């Protein structure tokens, strides 16, 4: 399969969509990103990377961090993690508060903000600095030492974190958050502000396509069964309130973020990351979803 040729065709075909959609600006620092970026990188299990466009340009991974934070928490707690957070799509916006009240503060899944805050709470209770543990983990996953969070983006989000603070306080009132709320929010904002490129994110997600093992280092991140379960959660809950439409169009487990990145995996073959900051109405990258739809169509490869 000539993945490079396919990615080049996708890059050309996606041009009319670049600059369309809305760059997330509720975190002011994110609003400064040029909307017409496009990058895509696909890494196969043998470590070969096929990339086009801005595939090496670092961007704010935002909610994609929830995938890796959840992986760490799943490593630490195993199945007990699901006492703290559910596994169902929420059918609500990623930052919605309504469901939490009638479900006694138990978040629907780890990929909406409420669930991710519980996951970060787990990490805060285990590590002196949860965000540093996550950064170290990501460095190991993709084999790159330079990965870190962007202090400006973290401060920008912290200054506008009222809704996440409200959510965390609300869950604490139900006994769902163990650590001090401010510590959890600080760590959460820093984890969302981690910057990585498409190439780095595709490499970091490759263990999911490889039964839980990082191909180049041999590190076992998760056993095969939890790897399957985490991928299943990505399929049902990884792309905001549009996961049904996303999987209809793309046919891959994926996790997106409001920075415009989307990571997706094809078990036993490859991991891919696409980035374009213009978002559709649901918060997924407009050009990114289209690019992934073309990828699975042109290659004939998806989980179905
Ligand atoms: N840091 C963002 C927030 O909590 C993450 C949003 C996202 O990428 O979904 O609002």
Image (spheres, helix red, strand yellow):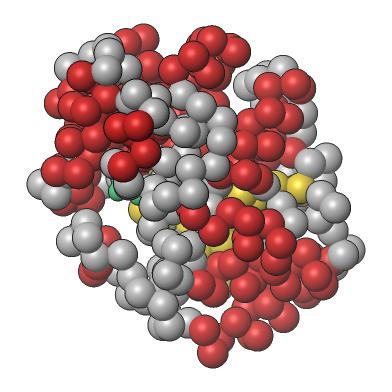
Q: Is residue 193 among what the camera can see?
A: yes
Is 190 drawn above or below residue 287 in the view shown? above
Comparing 125 with 43, the one in front is 125
Q: Is residue 271 among what the camera can see?
A: no
At x 60% / y 82%, what residue is drawn?
14
Quarter-wise, where is residue 243 in the image? bottom right
Q: Position of residue 140 (x, y in %)?
A: 53, 28
**Left or right relative to 208: residue 33:** left
Is 23 drawn above or below residue 131 in the view shown? below
**Left or right relative to 1: residue 123:** left
At x 62% / y 44%, what residue is drawn?
236
Q: Position of residue 250 (x, y in %)?
A: 71, 62
The residue lying furthest to the bottom in this view is 16
Placement of the N terminus among the 4 image quadrants: bottom right
Q: Position of residue 84 (x, y in %)?
A: 44, 17
The residue lying furthest to the left in this view is 159
Give the number of callouts.
0
Is 229 drawn above or below residue 284 in the view shown? above
Comparing 154 with 82, the one in front is 82
Q: Position of residue 138 (x, y in %)?
A: 49, 33
At x 59% / y 67%, what residue is drawn?
289
Quarter-wise, where is residue 47 in the image? top right
Comparing 60 with 93, the one in front is 93
At x 49% / y 33%, what residue is drawn?
109
């Amino acid at each position: 399969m000539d993945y490079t040729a396919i990615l080049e065709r996708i890059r050309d075909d996606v041009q009319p969509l670049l600059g369309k959609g809305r760059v997330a600006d509720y975190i002011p620092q994110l609003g400064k990103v040029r909307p017409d970026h496009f990058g895509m990188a696909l890494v196969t299990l043998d470590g070969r990377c096929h990339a086009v466009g801005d595939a090496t340009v670092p961007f704010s991974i935002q909610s994609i961090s929830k995938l890796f934070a959840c992986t760490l928490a799943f490593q630490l707690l195993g199945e007990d993690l699901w006492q703290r957070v559910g596994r169902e799509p929420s059918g609500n916006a990623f930052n919605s508060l309504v469901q939490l009240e009638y479900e006694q503060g138990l978040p629907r899944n780890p990929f909406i903000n409420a669930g991710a805050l519980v996951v970060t709470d787990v990490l805060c209770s285990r590590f002196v600095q949860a965000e540093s543990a996550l950064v170290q983990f990501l460095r190991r996953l993709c084999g790159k030492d330079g990965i870190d969070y962007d202090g400006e983006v973290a401060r920008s989000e912290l200054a506008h974190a009222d809704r996440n603070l409200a959510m965390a306080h609300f869950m604490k009132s139900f006994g769902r958050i163990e650590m001090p709320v401010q510590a959890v929010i600080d760590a959460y904002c820093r984890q969302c502000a981690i910057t990585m490129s498409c190439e780095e994110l595709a490499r970091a997600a490759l263990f999911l396509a490889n039964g839980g093992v990082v191909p180049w280092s041999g590190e076992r991140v998760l056993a095969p069964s939890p790897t399957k379960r985490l991928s299943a959660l990505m399929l049902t809950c990884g792309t905001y309130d549009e996961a049904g439409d996303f999987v209809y169009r793309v046919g891959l487990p994926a996790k997106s973020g409001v920075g415009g990145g989307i990571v997706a995996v094809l078990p036993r073959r490859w991991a891919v990351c696409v980035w374009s900051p213009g978002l559709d109405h649901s918060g997924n990258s407009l050009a990114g979803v289209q690019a992934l739809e073309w990828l699975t169509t042109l290659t004939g490869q998806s989980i179905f």
